[in-house]
Amino acid sequence: MKTRFLSLDILRGITLAGMILVNNNGNGDFTYGPLLHAKWNGFTPTDLVFPSFLFMVGVAMRFSLKAFNYELTPSVRNKILKRTIYLFLINYFVFYFPFTDFSFEKLRFLNVLPRIALSYCAVSFLTLQVPSKWLTWINAGILLSFWGILYVFGDAGSWMDISSNAVRKLDLFLFGESHLYHGNVINGIRIAFDPEGFLSTLPAISTCLFGYQVSLYLENQAKENKSASLGLLGWGAALVLVAVIWDHAFPINKKLWTSSFVLLCAGIDFILIGFLNWWIETKERHFGNTFFLVFGTNSILAYGISEVIAIQLGKFQIQDMSASDWLYWHIFEPIFGKYNGSLAYAITFVLVCWGVCWVFWRKKIFLKV
């Protein structure tokens, strides 16, 4: 029986490349719409990137836990908790290195890696203690409960607004305004709201759990020597349809990680895995796979490298502007124009990160947290 699917590593690599691309677009004022997040309700291709990465974390968990026979022993429990803590520490290292201007009073507690850490931890304990037959019901319960929580605890009539939703309220209560993300601008005023908030980690756990369930399905189909592609495509289409219908009552919203958003992203990921499974595992087409394997087999390292480079370029000053702005305005914009220059900057950034990761890949050095 096949225990490793090349298509999963490829999709993880595609996701990582997309994440680096949309996070480093040169100039946000001159970026093509599909490479920007939806401002609030709605959906763009960029909104799919982080959920897909989290989805792939869930997929990988099934295979990584096999070494422990899917039993929650004290040793396995400690490994799960250590990995959760390490992801938090890596996050703080990446974003505050070299700590010259570090301030605990302004420390943002939650972010991309902490969300991955909390989701990984929750899904690990859940799947190791609950029979697989109950996972779908638990997933549905999570999504319905989150809908109810937002509706009940948000302000009446504005429970989906950025300033009065339950996610923001809980974060303000738990952490305080200074520890939240301040990149959202409403009517010219920056508002404290964290798109990786504590409460919205609940549906993020659902995203991760969907990935775990896909790996279960792939495993079961492989045991019976059946192709998984058609089933994945069918389930993916069904999830997308439900998401579109639910959007009318519970809008698709990445920053709140709404339940309809979870279903939409999971459905698309089902379809992508179904296609890649057919193309790579069934048809055995491997052209160009190495590029994405460099990212896909070392995803945490790739993400960390991209963030360290981006943050340091933002801090380093050249002619009274950040190095990233200088590169855009003095190299990419003069050659390619404003919008194409922004795209060229993003592509170049991906290739630089890929080059660094390629060195590790050739030397078979992989960051295992």
Image: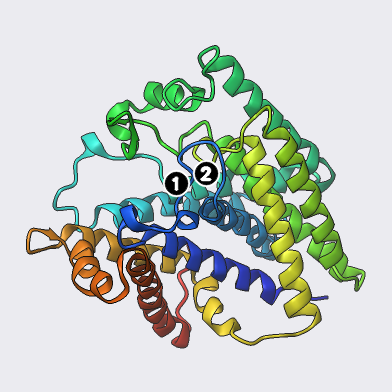
On screen, residue 2 above or below 247: below
> Which residue sits at x=58%, y=23%?
150
Q: Which residue is mark 1?
A: 114
Residue farthest toward the left in the current orientation of the protein: 319
Residue 102 at x, y percent in the picture: 19, 46
Residue 28 at x, y percent in the picture: 33, 54
Q: Residue 62's quadrant in the figure? A: bottom right
Residue 123 at x, y percent in the picture: 64, 46
Report the side of 63 relative to 340 (left or right). right
Q: Which residue is mark 2?
A: 118
What element does badge 2 sit on?
A: helix
Amino acid type assigned to the residue bearing label 2 in the image:
Leu
Would you say residue 96 is visible in this rendering? yes
Would you say residue 72 is visible in this rendering? no
Q: Which image quadrant: the N terminus? A: bottom right
Residue 329 or residue 168, whichever sits in front: 329
